[in-house]
């Protein structure tokens, strides 16, 4: 006698994809390229050898590609799409307002070094924001551990911590990038030529992005691209954050910023890696 089984497809979670997907392999490949770029930069700075190097635009494209692929594997396609869309729209809008008025970050404008512009802002800037936003979100998740779960408290906590993690990145990046001519602070500023207003703007921008994504992601069901990951793969964005911290320590053109780097990005990296190791020891699910 044939018996019809009940249809539970609408109620069962999507099963994780087993094995390493093409997206995961591509993410690892781009991670290797990023690591080689940093190694090249360190060797060139320490030895003076005229090694070839990636420019800022190529580096941003590769790093943002890694962030998108890693997020797609770890969070799923739809959550990644939402994350990137929120990041791109919020960052571009606030940058446009910022350049036009000076209200968000202080009075500044972009040079032509970062390529063609969309309005007043280089088209690559939304990619650059996500390049930094996603690894900082992963680092914040490692710092918070179980407290970063998708509860209301967890969403707000992660938004606060992640925005501070990312602003720490800008604290060691912005002075050098502006001195190199990528953008110009029209009235200078108290922090190595950068106005303190800028960092309040970074905190506000990133907090809005992280908070909106936290709220939206709770309503998005994981899709088939959301696969179970190894701890090493899950930690790759945090390792990228660590490499950036080392980069600013070794190849920093403003010597005083090395101290800032150690006690901001360096300290954050140390705590994040300890958190990742502790979760591995306690067998906390990735």
Image (cartoon, rainbow, N blue to C red):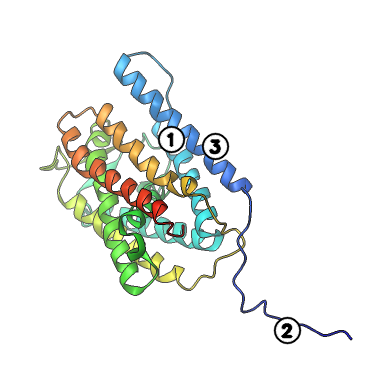
Tell me which numbered mark, 2 or 1, is placed earlier along the sequence: 2
- Tell me the residue that label 3 is attached to: 29
- Tell me the residue that label 2 is attached to: 6
Percent from the top left, x then y, of residue 66? 49, 44
At x 31%, y 59%, the residue is 144
**Residue 268 seen in the figure:** yes
Asked if the residues shown at circle 3 and circle 2 are in contact, with their CB atoms under 8 angstroms apart, the answer is no
Q: Secondary structure at mark 1?
A: helix
Distance CA(mark 1)–CA(mark 3): 14 Å
Q: Nearer the viewer, residue 165 or 109?
A: 165
Q: In the rendering, which numbered label is found on residue 14?
A: none
At x 55%, y 56%, the residue is 228
Tell me which numbered mark, 1 or 3, is placed earlier along the sequence: 3
Q: Is residue 120 above or below residue 153?
A: above
Q: Nearer the viewer, residue 78 or 236?
A: 236
> As drawn, is 173 to the left or to the right of 220?
left
- Tell me the residue that label 1 is attached to: 59
At x 39%, y 52%, the residue is 281
Q: Secondary structure at mark 2?
A: loop
Q: Nearer the viewer, residue 189 or 209?
A: 209
Distance CA(mark 3)–CA(mark 2): 43 Å
Asked if the residues shown at circle 1 and circle 3 are in contact, with their CB atoms under 8 angstroms apart, the answer is no
Which class describes the residues within 10 Å of circle 2: few (<14), some (14-19), or many (20+)?
few
Percent from the top left, x then y, of residue 53? 42, 24
């Amino acid at each position: 006698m044939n018996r019809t089984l009940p249809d539970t497809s609408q109620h069962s979670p999507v099963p994780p994809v087993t094995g390493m997907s093409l997206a995961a392999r591509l993410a690892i490949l781009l991670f290797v390229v990023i690591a080689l770029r940093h190694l090249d930069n360190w060797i060139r700075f320490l030895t003076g050898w005229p090694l070839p190097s990636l420019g800022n635009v190529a580096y941003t494209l590769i790093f943002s590609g890694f962030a998108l692929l890693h997020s797609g594997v770890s969070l799923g396609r739809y959550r990644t799409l939402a994350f990137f869309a929120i990041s791109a729209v919020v960052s571009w809008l606030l940058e446009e307002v910022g350049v036009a008025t000076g209200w968000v970050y202080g009075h500044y404008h972009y040079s032509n070094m970062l390529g063609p512009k969309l309005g007043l802002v280089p088209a690559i800037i939304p990619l650059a924001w996500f390049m930094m936003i996603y690894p900082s979100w992963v680092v914040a998740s490692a710092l918070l551990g179980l407290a970063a779960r998708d509860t209301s408290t967890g969403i707000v906590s992660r938004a606060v911590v992640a925005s501070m993690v990312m602003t720490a990145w800008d604290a060691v990046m912005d002075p050098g990038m502006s001195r190199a001519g990528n953008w110009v602070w029209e009235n200078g500023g108290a922090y190595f030529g950068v106005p303190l207003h800028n960092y309040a703007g970074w905190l506000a921008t990133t907090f809005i992005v992280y908070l909106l994504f936290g709220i939206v992601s709770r309503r998005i069901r994981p899709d088939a691209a959301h696969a179970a990951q190894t701890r090493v793969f899950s930690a790759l964005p945090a390792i990228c954050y660590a490499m950036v911290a080392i980069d600013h320590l070794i190849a920093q053109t403003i010597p005083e910023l090395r101290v800032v780097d150690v006690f901001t990005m360096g300290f954050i990296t140390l705590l994040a890696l300890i958190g990742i190791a502790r979760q591995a020891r306690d067998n906390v699910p990735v």
